[in-house]
Amino acid sequence: MSLLEVSGLNVSYGGIKAVRGIDLEVAAGELVCLIGANGAGKTTTLKALARLLPAHGKILYQGKSIAQTPVFDLVRQGIALVPEGRGIFGRLSVEENLLMGAYSRRDTQAIRHDLEKNYQLFPRLFERKTQQAGTLSGGEQQMLAIGRALMSRPRLLLLDEPSMGLAPLMVNKIFETIRAISAEGVTILLVEQNAKLALEASHRAYVMESGTICLSGESATLLNDPQVRHAYLGE
Amino acid sequence: MPNNWRRFTSDRRAAYVAFVLLGLLLAAAPFLVGASLGNGWVRILDFVLLYIMLALGLNIVVGYAGLLDLGYVAFYAVGAYLYALLASPHFGLHLPVWLILPLGALVAGLFGMTLGAPTLRLRGDYLAIVTLGFGEIIRIFLNNLNAPVNLTNGPQGISMIDPLGAGGVSLSQSFELFGVQVPGIYAIYYLFLALALLIVFISLRLQDSRIGRAWVAIREDEVAAEAMGINTRNVKLLAFAMGASFGGISGGLFAGFQGFVSPESFHLMESIMILCMVVLGGMGHIPGVILGAILLTVLPEALRYIGPLEEALFGRVVVDPADLRMLIFGLALIVVMIFRPAGLWPSKTRQREFSSEAEVLEHEQDALYDAQR
């Protein structure tokens, strides 16, 4: 059974339909990416899954509908979101940001342990743990946003455009980390504009175009698909 | 609390000594002030404490949760009128003070939620305008609820309110203590001081609590806060309710202290003054807010000496002291905001926020260098 099962998802902004009845599923342990051009509806889809936008359709998580679950409850059920534009708490320190990620947990011991684990994954954050998060560089902020989401011990991690606005070198670094998190068994749904990197990192992929899913399959297959290469990889 | 103090000073013994000295100063303050400046200034001292309580209440809403509230004085009014109605000849009710004050906090808290509920989706300027409207509505209601049923006695206000006190001891008159005549305003000072310290203590505890962190998260980024598992609706309502209840207590104290309330005391200007105390002192930083409240209460009073000063200098009053007073006051506000935009005594984090961007750029470079390695 899939961890996340979405069918007939519709999202509208006012009268404009941004997502038109898409189906997708993510199995436990998978790294699935959702790619597509600007305005294809990728982020809208992710926001709807994270309950940040009102949507129609079936969203099943672990076989149960989460279409009515309030946003703040999702994290208790194991869904963590790394929002578009990172959404870090700028005036709090790096460590305070990370601890904020564990807000829904009360097991102090385990939280400490996870904090250490995070610092191993991102040594950079350890160096800057007392620094105000708003003064971090873009890449560090993205690391912090991911680290913060991991602090809730998610089963499903929703990542919204982690490469946005970052230097290419930093993007590579972020993707390395995403692979490492996936290797540890966290299920990931990744929304990304950088199709090449996303396809290289993921197991399966969905390609979106004007609110619908036009292609899907194994990432390795799509990477060699002439149509995809032409439309999204600039060849 | 120990955590907070460690932040102020690493040397605990020095902190301890400072603590004791501060305690002695606070205990002796009315006698020192009374002996040097006269009892009029002890009264001002009482008001300073009242405004500290109000400013700390607003600090929860504005400083912690980042919700700009321009109608805060409404909760002050609710507390004051509740006291006035339940302890004056107006309805012939004379309930005890220890009952009215908590009740005032509770009722003001409910009013706070009433304001909070419809404004949950608003932020910044929009929220400011709605809260401003709310403050005015309360005042206008108080002004007009004398017909058809006389509830608030309209613009005349309610007078002959029972003074603060308990068990037959009234704090409005002077009384004898160990053979010394102590004026009532001294006793009021100690009552206000005790309550102000209580509110400081609650504020400190809140700041380091789960709820305090949730407020800060909401202030920083509401969507991310919700994604962290914070029930933003309830937490915001709690901020409104907590802030309002502090205002309600202060209002009750004000009514009992003055013996008279009227809608005149609860103008928009009053809300703005309290907001100025919070912003000028240092939003979200308790010592800063206290400093702001002290300065903004004392400064306008101190500027009353301008009239006599002009006479002494020029032999006559050149500029109307009342005009000059507000002019200097306004100028002082502008100067502080230009030279200390984060407030007079900001928290360390806010101070950093207003510092230069050079540091950030340097880190960007570092980070890129690191990625290259």
Image (tube, coloured by chain):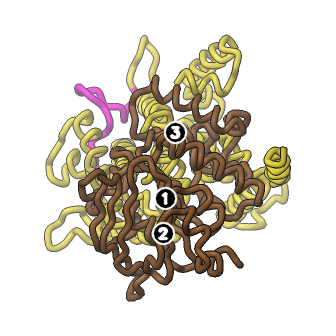
Dot 1 falls on a residue whose secondary structure is: strand
Residue at position x 84%, y 43% in the image: B373
Q: Chain of mark 2?
A: A
How many residues crowd around disc 3 within 10 Å: few (fewer than 14), some, or many (20 or more)?
few
- Chain coloured yellow here: B
The residues tagged by marks 1 and 3 sit, at their Cα atoms, a distance apart of 15 Å
Identify the element where label 3 is drawn: loop
Q: Three-letter amino acid code at disc 3? A: Glu
Residue on which the image places disc 2: A206
Q: Main secondary structure of the magenta part?
A: loop
Residue type, mark 1 in image: Val
Residues A159 and B294: in front is A159
Quadrant housing residue B114:
bottom left
Q: Position of residue B161 (x, y in %)?
A: 28, 47
Marks 1 and 3 belong to one chain: yes
Region of the chain picked out in magenta, as a range: B160-174
Residue identifier under label 1: A32
Query: On residue A184, which mark appears?
Result: 3
What's under tag 2, amino acid-wise? Answer: Tyr
Q: What residue is shown at x 55% (from left), y 21% (from top)?
A: B2
N-terminal of the pair, mark 2 or mark 1, is: 1
Rendered hue of chain A is: brown
- Label 3: chain letter: A
Tell me if I can see residue B149 in this picture.
yes
